[in-house]
Image (spheres, coloured by chain):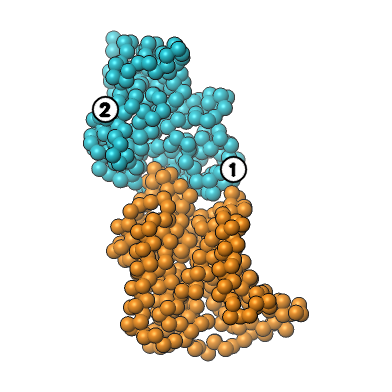
Chain colours: A orange, B cyan
Amino acid sequence: MTFVDFLNLLIAALLLAGIYAVMSVGMTVIYGVMKIVNLAHAGFMMMGAYFAYELYQRLHLDPILAALLAFPFFFLVGVAVHWLLVRWLPHSDRPTLQSLLLMFGLWLVLQNIGYLIWGNTDRSILSPRTLALVHLGPIIISSLRLVVFVAAAGCMAVLEIALSRTWFGRSVRALIQNRYAGRIVGVDDEKTARLTFGMGIAFAGVAGALLATLYSFDPDFGRPFLLRAFVIIVLGGLESVSGVALGALILALVETFSILFVPASYQPAISFALLVVVLVVLPGGIAGLWAKRRRLA
Amino acid sequence: MPEPVPAPILELQDLEVSYGAVQVLWGISLSVSKGQVVCIIGPNGAGKTTTLNAIIGVLKPTRGRIILEGQDIAGLPPHQRVQRHIALVPEGRHLWPGMSVEDNLMMGAFPPAFRPRVAHNLEGVYGMFPRLKERRHQLAGTLSGGEQQMCALGRGLMAEPHLLLLDEPSLGLAPILVDEIFQFVAEIVKHGVTILLVAQNIDYALQVSDYGYVMETGHIVLQGASDMLLNNQHVQQAYLGGSIEEPGAYPASQPAQG
């Protein structure tokens, strides 16, 4: 492998990490505030993909723009789902069976709505950008992946600023780190949970719309990404946003560079192997190693 | 000649609280007058912390009334009670370890109505605790125990409390820091804040307070002016080591004579 090959892989991994971070961070904030493992995340990612698809097909809207529109749309969807379903779950400081079953059931419902509307044929979004390349000397980058990365990094930056600078962000971090303390200073935990759930689903929708520009999709879209999101948030230590970014980078690096050693058909096994290794060796996640200093959320 | 009794800022009437099937408070009635320091003392598990949690609203009473400045707040959620300027400095401090000292303090003024005065109140807290100002960008989890207690006190003060609920402010601190913390408490009192104090350090609690309640197994068993309680036989024997041969030998239902 030449140095240029290495650089190409490194850049590919970095670009992949951006979208991985966006698809995982929604699960992280929901887990952090509500201790709910949102299995329906995959369903909302799938809906996000079709959201971009429909806007592109009907209105010829740029899918990246559609991804940005997905944020407010899926935020409202998330708030509605919380109001209709999630708020009735028993409150708990740890994941409950009820919440797992509810979210799993919701995923199945979303999937079947998908089959009902769009059938089981593969769809994809082919825009003029799909095949365009950017040449930086000997390094070749897909311009679409670059744009997706910029959008993803932008989303993460906005989230970071929102969490660290706004009252809502402070209340989210407060509930994640110590729910009781949040309540005694006057955080309305029910309202914060509702908004957080909306935000988490919004990130799922954005991630799905962005992914739809890179991959073909059907109503089962999201399943392999859900598994990756699990690996990432376990790597990241479950409750920290900076940990998610790091976990996404590690998974992207491992997946990308594994192509050199493992046949591509084995790739899905890589994330699982990584998950097992992390759970055995570092149950607190990589971020747990320096969690005391860097724990943001 | 008796002094005129100031109006109560807080009154608990016949308060009962249960954790599931286990009842922990059995009809607590107490009253806190404006500008006073009132303490609740008693052994572990007597229900002192439960009482404060019921006042701030994180525990729902099964019976009874909680009257704050003339209004029954027993049915309100915590965030609506905090808006009425009551603040709890909880046992164990309960800071957010991964947030900066300044963010911890700011969260004390979380209700929207408090936010316009955040900068002003932050200056006030920093004036009282200069060490917190030095460390304002540090994560709260990296503070020493005494500094964490100051941070918790400061967070409580950010709500401009009319009534400050203080739960074991000296627990787990070195004796020299205990002195320091109680000096801060005295200073807070000087600012006209009414305090309901729960403390295991009974000597201190009774010295710093005007009035005291003794709580045992979910009942108020004794009450009186703090200097009277300090000399009370039951308090002396059960809590102050007046007779260490038989600690706690008094039945809870039998208040001792002053």
Is residue A52 visible in the rendered image? The answer is: no
For the point 30% across and 32% down, the residue is B25
Q: Which residue is mark 1?
A: B142
Q: Which residue is mark 2?
A: B29
* Front residue of A86 and B13: A86
Circle 1 marks a residue in which chain? B
**Dot 2, crowdedness within 10 Å: few (<14), some or many (≥20)?**
some
Circle 2 marks a residue in which chain? B
Amino acid marked by disc 2: Ser
> Height in image: B19 above or below B169?
below
Which quadrant of the view contains residue B255? top left
For the point 40% across and 76% down, the residue is A47
Residue A25 rendering spot, x and y as whole percentages:
49, 64
**Dot 1, crowdedness within 10 Å: few (<14), some or many (≥20)?**
some
* Front residue of B104 and B239: B239
- The quadrant the N terminus of chain B occupies is top left
Residue B189 rendering spot, x and y as whole percentages:
42, 27
Is residue A179 visible in the rendered image? The answer is: yes
Question: Is B84 positioned to the left or the right of A23 in the image?
Answer: left
